[in-house]
Amino acid sequence: MKLHQLRYLAAIVDNGLNITAAARALHTSQPGVSKQIKLLEDELGFEVFERQGRTLRRLTPAGEQVVARAQRILEEARNIRRLSEEARDEKKGSMSIATTHTQARYVLAGIVKRFREQYPEVKLHLHQGTSEQIASLAAEDRVDFAIATGSQELFPGMVLMPCYRWHRDIVVPKGHPLARIEKPTLKDLSRHPVVTYVFSFSGRSSLPALFERARLPLDVALTAHDADVIKTYVRLGLGVGIIACMAVTEKEDPDLAAIDGSHLFPEHVTWLGVRRGRLLRGYMYDFMRLFAPHLSRRLVEQALRAATPEESAALFEDIRLPRY
């Protein structure tokens, strides 16, 4: 049994049992991947996959156990490489972060600047996307950290550590009728078309649910993933914007009025996720502390050692999270 065979096996699973896609991700040939999996099955004495012709249909019960152990072995192999890198030079290396546009644009910029001042020789890779795209990168182990809000169910293999709370604000052009109301009601909002995030339209705290409970109409003019896009269309007069409170500032948006929406919309918690069992380098702990000061090395290590998600979540129950 060879390490590269386990790597091929994990890649097939990560790519939905598609050998061609796995070979592409591994930068090798499809026949080569198929041959190595067949050699592995011959050595094990049982089939890892159920097949229909040349198509892999599902993992066998024994195959599921093999994959689970293979993934742990591969994670430990990556940890050994990190130990080697740490021993060679603790101030050099790389770090990859997957996050949303709002986090990358409005929260992380200052933190990354401070981090780079401390670690100028660490290469940073920032990937932006939706929660689903971030989850895909995390599942493929292409990032060290995932930073997002909600959608915890998409990240079953990660330890999710709460960082801070935030709420949504109402954004209108200065001079708009709502700008003259200190605390607009849902009824006030229902009189105008709305421009907001795509993710605001799922779950119990979604905008439709809020308006439905209040028995008020909701006129959705436009949805987008990007706060800057939403603000652009608010400026064009398409509707009232509802965006994250950190995504509008007097300095960058002098023509817009931001109205505190904390009395209308539920609070959200942004979290930072790390793959369970991951060995972090020293500068990674420092980055986490810059992003969320309560994430001390000791607390993070306790969370990563926790046996279950419930145990790791319990470590944060008594921590008073800052509000953005």
Image (cartoon, rainbow, N blue to C red):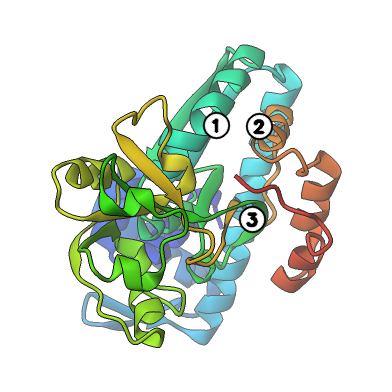
Q: Do tag 2 and tag 1 residues touch (Cβ < 8 Å)?
A: yes
Q: Residue at x 29, y 32 (%)?
A: 255
The circle drawn on residue 148 is: none
- Vertical relation: 146 (above or below) 20: above
Please rate how many residues cluster around mark 3, counting C-alpha atoms within 10 Å: few if below 14, some from 14 to 19, many from 20. Answer: some
The image quarter in which residue 285 lies:
top right
In the picture provided, is 122 more to the left or to the right than 228? right
Image mark for residue 95: 1
CA–CA distance in space, label 2 to label 1 = 10 Å
Q: Residue at x 64, y 45 (%)?
A: 77
Residue 225 place in picture, x, y as percent? 29, 52
Residue type for callout 3:
Ile
Above or below, comparing residue 43 to residue 320 in the picture: below
Residue 212 visible from this viewpoint: yes
Q: Which residue is mark 2?
A: 287
Measured Cα–Cα span from mark 3 to mark 1: 21 Å
What residue do we see at 58% from left, 17% from top? 116
**Rendered-image quadrant of the C terminus:** top right
Q: Which mark is residue 73?
A: 3
SS under mark 3: helix
Give the crowd class for mark 1: few <14, some 14-19, many >=20 residues within 10 Å.
some
- What amino acid is found at the position of numbered circle 2 in the picture? Phe
Mark nearer the N terminus (2 vs 3) = 3
Is any part of residue 17 visible from this angle? no
Rendered location of residue 295, percent (x, y):
76, 44
Q: In this rendered view, identify the residue nearer to me: 5 or 102.
A: 102
Taking depth in this image into account, of 151 and 298 the one nearest to the observer is 151
SS of the residue at dot 2? helix
